[in-house]
């Protein structure tokens, strides 16, 4: 009897019809359909905008490269072809070895070396001075500590263009005209980099500093073993920015370089251009322009991952 009743109960047991129904999928809202990540039209629009931006940025560079492969006569006789010409090796070998007549026949290699030394000196000098200044301001206690910081910060309102005459007078008195030191030293102080390093150092927990002190780490060991590894991404991001800053300098190198052998590539480009088109060796100008943008591109591409990571971590 018990088994029969159990069978009746078992046979009479049925799931609730409502529970047996599969829950229908929630239809996508109109807002979800319009999201770029879920709409094919949005994806195509985003790609079209990106492609348009790439074309706008890259086409002048491509056109400059095309002009650098044609002869001077072809460039002066418009319209300029859209495809590279047959003078690639001739133009580039002439620029690399002989340069232009308006810059004293200095080759582009010499100009690139001068500009690279200047850009590296400015970038490394700014980073070294700024990180040491920020380290002293944040982790040491001494009289007028914040006063010194604000004095450094106020120099943001005094760029080299504002103090160019007294700075030039100092360089003349020290005999640093037409030298790498004269190109680099006046530009290696950076209040912006000092501020960025200070803000980053202030985010380091005090427990880490105390633990290093308990382990017997002195100031220099704490700096080299702890702070520098933590600051790698920030240093990389600043290096890219400061290298490009040094590479594109124009006014200061124009003042402190009288010899063509000490010209930077930006100064050489300006000297190569004459007011009369017929007097300008445009094919060499285009070659020099292409060669001038290669080192910054290499630096940005090589350090792109560190650059982006440093900017993101700096905002946290």
Image: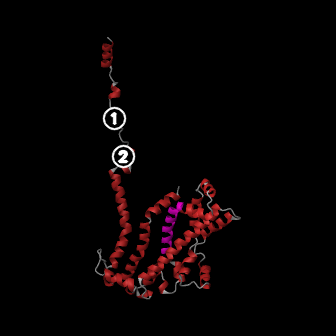
Give the secondary structure at mark 2: helix
Q: Is residue 91 visible?
A: yes
Q: Residues within 10 Å of mark 1 (few under 14, many from 20)?
A: few
C-alpha separation, residue under disc 2 versus residue under disc 1: 18 Å
Looking at this rendering, what residue extends furthest in the top direction?
A: 1
Q: Is residue 240 magenta?
A: yes
Q: Main secondary structure of the magenta part?
A: helix
Q: Colour scheme used in the picture? A: secondary structure
Q: Quarter-wise, where is residue 186 in the image?
A: bottom right
125 shown above or below 106: above
- Percent position (x, y) of residue 218? 63, 62
Residue drawn at 44 percent across, 67 percent down: 300
Name the residue beneath numbered marker 2: 33
Name the residue beneath numbered marker 1: 24
- How many numbered discs? 2
The answer to whether 297 appears left or right of 136 in the picture is left
Q: Which residues are magenta?
A: 229-247
Tell which of 43 and 294 is nearer to you. Answer: 294
Q: Is residue 70 visible?
A: no
Q: Residues within 10 Å of mark 2 (few under 14, many from 20)?
A: few
Name the N-terminal-most of marks 2 and 1.
1
Looking at this rendering, what residue extends furthest in the right direction?
A: 143
- Percent position (x, y) of residue 143? 71, 64
- Percent position (x, y) of residue 298? 41, 70
């Amino acid at each position: 009897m018990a088994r029969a009743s159990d069978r009746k109960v078992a046979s009479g047991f049925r799931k609730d019809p409502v529970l047996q129904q599969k829950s229908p999928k929630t239809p996508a809202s109109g807002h979800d359909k319009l999201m770029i990540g879920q709409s094919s039209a949005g994806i195509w629009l985003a790609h079209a905008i990106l492609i348009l931006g790439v074309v706008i940025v890259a086409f002048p560079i491509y056109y400059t490269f095309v002009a650098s492969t044609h002869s001077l006569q072809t460039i002066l006789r418009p319209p300029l072809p859209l495809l590279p010409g047959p003078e690639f090796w001739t133009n580039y070998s002439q620029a690399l070895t002989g340069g232009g007549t308006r810059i004293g026949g200095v080759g582009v290699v010499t100009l690139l070396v001068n500009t690279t030394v200047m850009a590296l000196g400015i970038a490394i000098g700014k980073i070294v001075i700024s990180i040491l200044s920020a380290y002293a301001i944040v982790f040491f206690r001494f009289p007028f500590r914040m006063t010194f910081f604000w004095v450094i910060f106020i120099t943001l309102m005094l760029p080299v263009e504002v103090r160019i005459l007294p700075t030039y007078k100092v360089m003349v008195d020290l005999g640093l005209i037409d030298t790498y030191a004269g190109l680099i030293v006046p530009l290696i102080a950076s209040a912006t980099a000092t501020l960025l390093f200070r803000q980053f150092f202030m985010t380091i927990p005090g427990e880490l500093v105390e633990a290093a002190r308990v382990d017997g780490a002195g100031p220099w060991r704490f700096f080299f073993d702890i702070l520098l590894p933590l600051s790698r991404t920030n240093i990389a991001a600043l290096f890219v920015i400061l290298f490009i800053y040094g590479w594109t300098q124009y006014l200061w190198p124009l003042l402190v370089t009288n010899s063509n052998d000490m010209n930077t590539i930006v100064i050489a480009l300006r000297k190569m251009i004459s007011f009369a088109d017929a007097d300008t060796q445009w094919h060499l100008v285009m070659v020099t322009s292409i060669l001038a943008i290669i080192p910054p591109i290499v630096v940005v591409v090589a350090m792109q991952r560190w650059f982006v990571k440093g900017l993101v971590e700096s905002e946290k």
